[in-house]
Image (cartoon, helix red, strand yellow):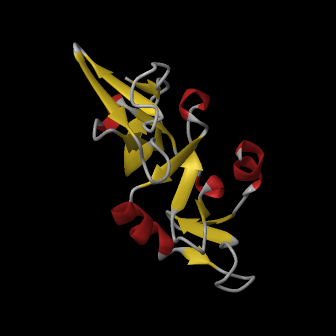
Amino acid sequence: MLGPNKTDRYREFPLLSKCGKERNFVRCDDCAFVFTHILEKKTPDGTTEMHLAYNHADSLLSLKFEPEKVLMIPETGRVYHPAPERVGSIGLIRSKLAIELSKSFTFKNGETNPPTEFTFMNKTYTLDSKWYKKKL
């Protein structure tokens, strides 16, 4: 389980990962929460919905994918999606997946600004970055 480093040890590492008896002190360049791939998941009513998986655990660890909330920061090229509040509310989409998703962005305000639309599964979504700005 990854969480804040509330110990007096290794203060330069803001995160602590506990795994049994093992303790790993962690620092990352961006978000500690990383989505690894998109998958289709059945709901209790038998329908399917798209999910973003994390920690390479397939459907065991996934969140509902909200295509309208995908956000790409042009200065870095990094792509984000909402994540659980307990992990900071912002999740990074891994580079390999972000590159694939970026092929479906539309930049109506120019490529130096965030994309305005995202096409996913033949549907075009107007992108909403308000969620991201509220979390900063």
Q: Residue reaching furthest bottom?
A: 110
Give the percent coordinates (x, y) of residue 119: 57, 69
Relative vertical location of residue 98 with respect to residue 22 in this rendering, above or below: below
Left or right of 26, for residue 50: right
In the displayed image of the protein, which residue is found farthest to the left? Answer: 21
The residue nearer to you, when weighing 10 against 59, is: 10
The quarter of the picture where the N terminus appears is: top left
In which quarter of the view is residue 94 placed? Answer: bottom left
The total of numbered circles placed on residues is: 0
Residue visible at 46% across and 25% down in the picture: 5
Q: x, y (%) of residue 37?
A: 36, 51
Examine the rendering and report whether any part of residue 105 can be seen. Answer: yes
Would residue 88 appear left or right of 98 to someone viewing this image? right
Q: Nearer the viewer, residue 136 or 23?
A: 23
Q: Residue at x 67, y 72 (%)?
A: 114
Q: Going by the image, does 96 lie left or right of 113?
A: left
Q: Nearer the viewer, residue 5 or 62?
A: 5
Residue 38 seen from this side: no
Residue 115: % across, % down: 65, 73
Q: Is residue 76 above or below residue 108?
A: above
Residue pictured at 39% horizontal, 42% vertical: 53
Figure quadrant of residue 109: bottom right
Residue pictured at 37% horizontal, 31% vertical: 61
Q: Is residue 11 above or below residue 30?
A: above
Most foreground residue, 58 or 113: 113
Left or right, 5 with respect to 72, comes to: left
In the rendered image of this protein, does residue 135 appear above or below residue 20?
below
